[in-house]
Image (cartoon, rainbow, N blue to C red):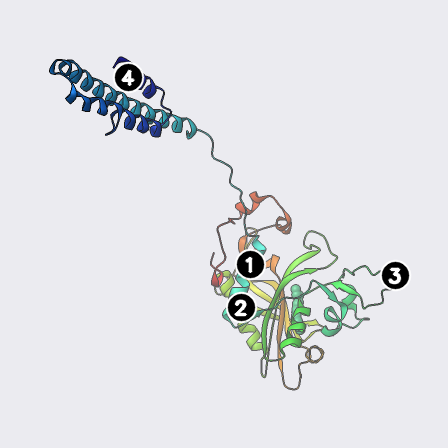
């Protein structure tokens, strides 16, 4: 009996896990376990033998059962301790740095413009940034000898010796996109062409790449009056307040007549406010598309007419968000973006609201 006890107490003490413990329980006190079998043998004993063996077996059974229960608790505690060791968390550690990013203000303004013009029925057209000089100049009524070609400070692509294809340029405006759109879909057409344009010009107010949006509406009887309405509607939606426009006669080779467009503003304490006051700020060029341009794009000028306009996006982004220096757009430091109130989670919405 003592041997039996020692065997089980020792085995229970060194059981590695609950499964081993269960196996021991079955072996010792299970229905066909060693102790149960011994209890069954009590019947064959003499009353005297039974009197000592009975209580001893019962006591052994109790002892083993409580050893099993104690070991089970010890195993569970050990398992919990192990988890607590492995899964601890130091809540006093500083948080991990989050990567921060933001949609560039120019991209946001592009989105805003796209949304506002979309409301007025304009689709977005896109095209190559490296253009054939026919699309960038000739189709726009700017022939080879025209001073505008020189004025535009064009970047020409390198040509290998013997390559006699027509010159390619970095587009100086997004007008070629609209020429391509007219060739592809003909008239009537209403598109805007947002995109990067390039001119070899670099100083306080010019960067060699700048973002532009051009617009084009061609139909049977589109007029300058429609142009004025579309632009006032656009600026009012973009700045979130009624904005008057002023047209001044101008000249572009691709429009006739041509007009420079100013928006109403006030100048006070060195800051510009759009949509109030008696001052004017030049923001875009526009006009009625020249018949030669329509013809070059495959649109019959005796049947169709319309307006076009072009504006720099950096200018109107600076005006809306109070950014004083063009160079901020090319800064990779996010602090200035935060300073002007741009954050990663702000997404442009319709009608100029942020
Ligand atoms: C400016 C002036 C302008 C256009 C762009 C245009 C496009 C086609 C036909 C005719 Cl396809 N015109 N675009 C017209 C007038 C002015 O831009 O100062 N932009 C910054």
SS at circle 2: helix
- Find out whether the residues at labels 4 and 3 contact each other: C-beta distance under 8 Å: no
Q: State the separation of the CA atoms marked 2 and 3.
A: 45 Å
Residue placed under numbered mark 4 in the picture: 4
The answer to which quarter of the image holds residue 295 is: bottom right
Q: Are marks 2 and 3 in contact (CB under 8 Å)?
A: no
Query: Could you tell me which secondary element the residue under label 1 belongs to?
Result: helix
Please name the residue shown 69% across and 69% down the image: 176
Query: Which comes sooner in the sequence, label 2 or label 1?
Result: 1
Spatial distance from mark 1 to mark 3, Cα to Cα?
A: 42 Å
Query: Around disc 2, counting alpha carbons within 10 Å, would you say few (fewer than 14), some (14 to 19), or many (20 or more)?
Result: many
- Where is residue 209 shown, x and y percent of the image? 69, 56
What residue is rendered at 71% in x and 52% in y? 203
Q: Which residue is mark 3?
A: 161
- Residue 222 visible from this viewpoint: yes
Q: Earlier in the sequence, mark 1 or mark 4?
A: 4
Residue drawn at (75%, 68%), measured in percent from left and top?
132
The answer to whether 156 appears left or right of 336 in the picture is right
Mark 4 touching mark 2, by CB under 8 A? Answer: no
Quadrant hosting residue 266: bottom right
Residue bearing the label numbered 2? 117
Residue at (52%, 69%) from the top-left corner?
Answer: 118
């Amino acid at each position: 009996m003592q041997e039996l006890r020692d065997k089980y107490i020792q085995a229970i003490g060194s059981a590695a896990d609950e499964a081993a413990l269960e196996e021991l329980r079955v072996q010792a006190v299970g229905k066909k376990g060693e102790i149960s079998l011994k209890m069954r043998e009590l019947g064959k004993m003499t009353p005297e033998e039974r009197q000592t063996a009975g209580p001893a077996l019962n006591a052994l059974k109790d002892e083993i059962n409580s050893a099993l229960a104690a070991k089970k608790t010890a195993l569970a505690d050990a398992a919990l301790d192990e988890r607590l060791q492995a899964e601890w968390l130091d809540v006093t550690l500083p948080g991990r740095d989050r990567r921060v990013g933001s949609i560039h203000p120019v991209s946001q303004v592009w989105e805003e413009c796209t949304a506002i013009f979309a409301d007025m029925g304009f689709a977005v057209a896109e095209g190559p940034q490296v253009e054939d000089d026919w699309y960038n100049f000739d189709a726009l009524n700017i022939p080879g000898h025209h001073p505008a070609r020189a004025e535009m400070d064009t970047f020409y692509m390198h040509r290998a010796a013997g390559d006699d294809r027509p010159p390619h340029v970095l587009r100086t405006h997004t007008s070629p996109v609209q020429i391509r759109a007219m060739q592809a879909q003909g008239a009537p057409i209403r598109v805007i062409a947002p995109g990067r344009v390039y001119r070899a010009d670099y100083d306080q107010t010019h960067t060699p790449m700048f973002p532009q949006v051009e617009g084009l509406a061609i139909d049977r009887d589109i007029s300058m009056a429609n142009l004025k309405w579309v632009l006032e509607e656009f600026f009012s939606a973009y700045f979130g307040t009624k904005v008057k426009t002023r047209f001044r006669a101008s000249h572009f080779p691709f429009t006739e007549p041509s007009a420079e467009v100013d928006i109403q503003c006030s100048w006070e304490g060195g800051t510009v406010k759009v949509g109030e006051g008696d001052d004017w700020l030049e923001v875009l060029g526009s006009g009625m598309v020249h018949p030669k341009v329509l013809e070059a794009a495959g649109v019959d000028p005796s049947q169709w007419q319309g307006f076009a306009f072009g504006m720099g996006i950096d200018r109107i982004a600076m005006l809306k968000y109070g950014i004083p220096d063009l160079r901020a757009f090319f800064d990779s430091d996010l602090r200035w973006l935060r300073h002007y109130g741009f954050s990663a989670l702000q997404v442009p919405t319709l009608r100029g609201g942020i």
